[in-house]
Each structure stands twice: as C-alpha cells, then as structure tokens.
Image (cartoon, helix red, strand yellow):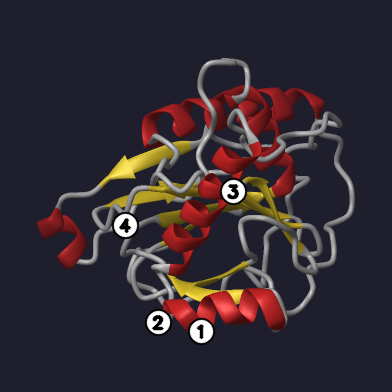
Amino acid sequence: MPYGPHRRVPPFDRDMPDVNARPRHPFQRVEISTSMASAGWHAETSRVTGPCPARALAAPPTAPGVAMQSVMWKQAVEWLAAAATDPQECKREWDHGTGTVLVEAGRYWDVLSVPDRLGLLALDILWRDPLKVPGPTLVDSAARRVGFFLPPDPVSEWIGFGVRHVGRGSWVAVPPPYRPAGRLEWLVPPDGMGTLHRPGTLETALREATGTLAVLAPVSAEPVVPDGAW
C-alpha cells in the first residue's frame, strides 16, 4: 500500500514485506500536487528488493584537528536534538538514559525507510563520489531497515516494495550522533550543518540498486521482524 506523509507510524515498519521477492517494477518516487493529495489520490505500489553488499559503509565524517572534531559533534548533537519536544531532555537521555530518543519527523527532515538490502547497496552507490558525503543514514540492525534523512516534502510519495516515507505526524527513534545505541547506529551521522540526502540523487541510487538486486537476489524465506521496528 502507498504510504502517505501524514500517517502516524512507529520509527520502523512492524510488518515489513518480504524483501527477498523479485521486483515487478522499478523503484519510483511520485510527485503529487497538493490538490491531488487532498483528494486522496495514490499511486500504485511497486516492488524493490535484494541482497545487501558486504562492504563496510561509513565512518563519521572528520575534520582536521581534535578541536574541530569536537565542534562538529556538538553541532551535530544540537541539530538532531532540535527536532525533539525538549532538546535539553533529549540530550540528557542520550547521555544518561537509554541512549535513544523519539524525535519528530517532518519539521527539519523526513526519513525514507527501506529494507536493509536495498538501503545498504544504495548507500554504497552514493559513496562512489569521494567528494560528496551522503546525508544522515541510520540503520536498525534488528529490524533490518535503513533510514535516509532527506528534506521535508509533504506533497511527494515514495513508492516501492517495503519502502516507507516517514514525514510530519511521525516520530523516529534516534541514537546520539556520536555512538550507537542498542540496535540503532548511524552509518552516516549528521554533520551538524543540516546536510541531507538530495531526493533526486537518492532516487537514482535506489533505482540502480533495485536493478542490481533484481539480478542478484535469491528467493528465500522472509526475515523475522522484531516488535518496535520502523
């Protein structure tokens, strides 16, 4: 089913579809005008699937000197905490609590959540250009989901098998930028300057990953998705 930007959802998809089925259609992002969205128009869902690459993905971005790194991490913490209801309490929870905090999507960013096999390969493709660091990217290792942080866009839908566009009205569990927390870990942490994935570039990478996985993906059993998943 298509995923609208105003639907309140947990951080990961509890009922993630089979990520091992072969795709029927290419990945696509659909632009929806405000009038069409308000009229309840939806596009048909397409499928995207496949295996994840084996290569390690990303270390936190660095800058020359320890002092510069410290400033960068402080900026990243402030930027991410700004989406919380209480930024100060958010930072205390990161330091002394469970390590994860629910922050609101749709204000400063949306999240495109995809099956890990698709997301890891797409991120691998985005790293091909050594001069461009991808936007913030989060992985839930237990739910096998990857979340790409991109600019808020309430009038578009991302259509794909197992793909969820998390926008305004939704909340996302995130760890602090400087360390993992439980099953959540940053593959590319926020840089503190508001850098996000470019939708067009991300869509191109997902399309390429979909085509690759259509050839490589074996048919196997559906993975078990734990409770509390995006």
Q: Which residue is mark 2?
A: 85
- At label 3, the amino acid type is Ser
- Mark in front: 1 vs 3: 3
Q: Which residue is mark 4?
A: 42
Residue 217 quadrant: top right
Tag 2: Cα neighbours inside 10 Å, few (<14), some, or many (≥20)?
few
- Mark in front: 4 vs 2: 2
Cα gap from disc 3 to disc 4, whole angstroms? 45 Å
Cα gap from disc 4 to disc 2, whole angstroms? 31 Å
Answer whether labels 1 and 3 touch (C-beta < 8 Å).
Answer: no
Q: Nearer the viewer, residue 131 or 35?
A: 131
Q: Which residue is mark 1?
A: 89
How far across and how far down the image is residue 43, in percent? 35, 51
- Mark in front: 3 vs 4: 3
Cα gap from disc 1 to disc 3, whole angstroms? 21 Å
How far across and how far down the image is residue 173, in percent? 59, 71
Q: Which residue is mark 3?
A: 70
Query: Mark 2 or mark 4, which is nearer the start of the sequence?
Result: 4
Q: Nearer the viewer, residue 65 or 230?
A: 65
Answer whether labels 1 and 4 touch (C-beta < 8 Å).
Answer: no
Q: Secondary structure at mark 4?
A: loop
How far across and how far down the image is residue 87, in percent? 44, 76
